[in-house]
Image (spheres, rainbow, N blue to C red):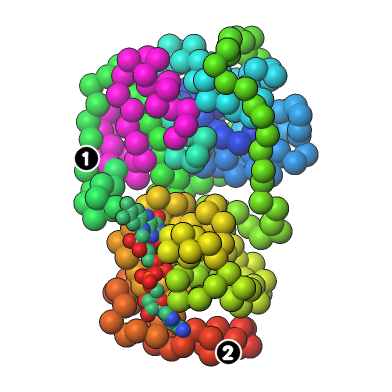
Amino acid sequence: MGGRGRAASGDGEAGVVEGQQGAAGHRGRLAGVARAGVQQADRQRRVAEPGMDGLAEAAAKLDGVSKVRVADNAAYAHLLAEPTAALLAELAGDYSHVLAAASTTGKNVLPRVAALKDVAQISEIIAVESPDTFKRPIYAGNAIATVQSEDALKVITVRSTGFDAVAEGGSAAIEAVDFVADNAQSTFLKEELAQSDRPELGAAKVVISGGRGMGNGENFKLLDGIADKLGAAIGASRAAVDAGFVPNDMQVGQTGKIVAPDLYIAVGISGAIQHLAGMKDSKVIVAINKDEEAPIFQVADYGLVADLFEAVPELEQQL
Ligand SMILES: Cc1cc2nc3c(=O)[nH]c(=O)nc-3n(C[C@H](O)[C@H](O)[C@H](O)COP(=O)(O)OP(=O)(O)OC[C@H]3O[C@@H](n4cnc5c(N)ncnc54)[C@H](O)[C@@H]3O)c2cc1C
């Protein structure tokens, strides 16, 4: 391909990837790199903290990446948005595209980069048509907009579930970046991370989600058995989160996480468009709902009209 692809990474939470030659002919590639970068980051972070050698090496092995630039400086610890955006804006001059996965971090940092560079931000693309033209869902995924940008620099967040991860096989150079952003605006105080042995929602191959039909937080434990057997992540509808059944980092949907696992099991979820927006790209959708009119059955590949309190234990037993 001959293009220059580079990944600049912070403390391991996000991969930010750019391709000098633009995205033509790379449908999925840049975004795939971005996604792989994040997945690798998750894996590497545990072994590589506080340095980033493991992460940089993992990124360097990705197909299509020819240089990895590493800014290993305390200024970027915890990927605070202001210094990270300043760093990317500083580096952006070398590139035609700056991409990040549309994760919490990507959505926090990239609009600031766009503002600093005085260009438009293009959000949550799901396809690359040409170097300046992209597709992105609007109206909770009910319509797909084709967006063309005339800006010299394209700043883009990528819905990584829309792309395949790239394979390994590269051996990119790793280069240190000296730029240290001056950050007087924000200070890291603390973070509270939910501890879980389950796979991360966004990366899980199987997701089982509960809705308001679960009745209460205690009943969510009903989903544990199936999740254990299938190695699944557990998600939830917003109604379940708003009712306090489960924490909001489990929310799937328009205002939660976007997932596209091989298998999505919706339990006691009606299938409001805002929920569908977060999971309808799943390969196989299974719905358990006692209301046969529930809209979730319109997107489900397999539907079970049943009381979840009977069906879920039965399903677990069958597994
Ligand atoms: C701007 C905006 C953003 C939103 N973002 C999101 C989002 O990101 N994610 C999201 O999920 N929602 C989102 N919503 C909310 C969304 O509109 C719905 O209100 C929500 O998804 C409903 O959740 P639910 O399906 O769990 O609850 P309900 O709609 O109340 O459905 C519960 C379902 O459980 C079934 N049920 C009840 N008891 C049983 C039983 N014993 N056995 C089997 N089935 C049973 C019922 O038949 C029903 O279908 C958003 C809304 C707005 C306005």
| Gap between marks 1 and 2 measured at Cα | 45 Å
Q: Is residue 46 magenta?
A: no
Residue neighbourhood size for the residue with mark 2, other residues' Cα within 10 Å, grouped as few (<14), some (14–19), many (≥20):
few
Quadrant of picture, ligand 1: bottom left
- Residue 190, quarter of the rendered image: top right
Say which residue appears at 41% left-offset and 39% top-offset.
158
Q: Quadrant of the C terminus?
A: bottom right
Amino acid beneath label 1: Thr
Disc sitting over residue 49 in the figure: none
What residue range appears in magenta? Answer: 107-135
Residue receiving disc 2: 314
* Residue 70 left/right relative to 295: right
Residue visible at 34% across and 84% down in the picture: 291
- Rendering coords of residue 40 (x, y %): 63, 41
Q: Is residue 133 magenta?
A: yes
Residue behind label 1 places its C-beta within 8 angstroms of ligand 1: no
Q: Quick check: can you spot residue 218?
A: yes
Tell me, yes or no, whether the two marked residues, 1 and 2, touch with CB atoms within 8 Å. Answer: no
Q: Nearer the viewer, residue 247 or 202?
A: 247
Give the label, 1 or 2, closer to the camera. 2
Residue 92, x across and y down, in percent: 45, 16
- Between 1 and 51, the residue placed more toward the observer is 51
x, y percent for residue 237: 44, 63
Residue at position x 63%, y 88% in the image: 317
Three-letter amino acid code of the residue under disc 2: Glu
Q: Secondary structure at mark 2?
A: helix
**Mark 1, residue position:** 146
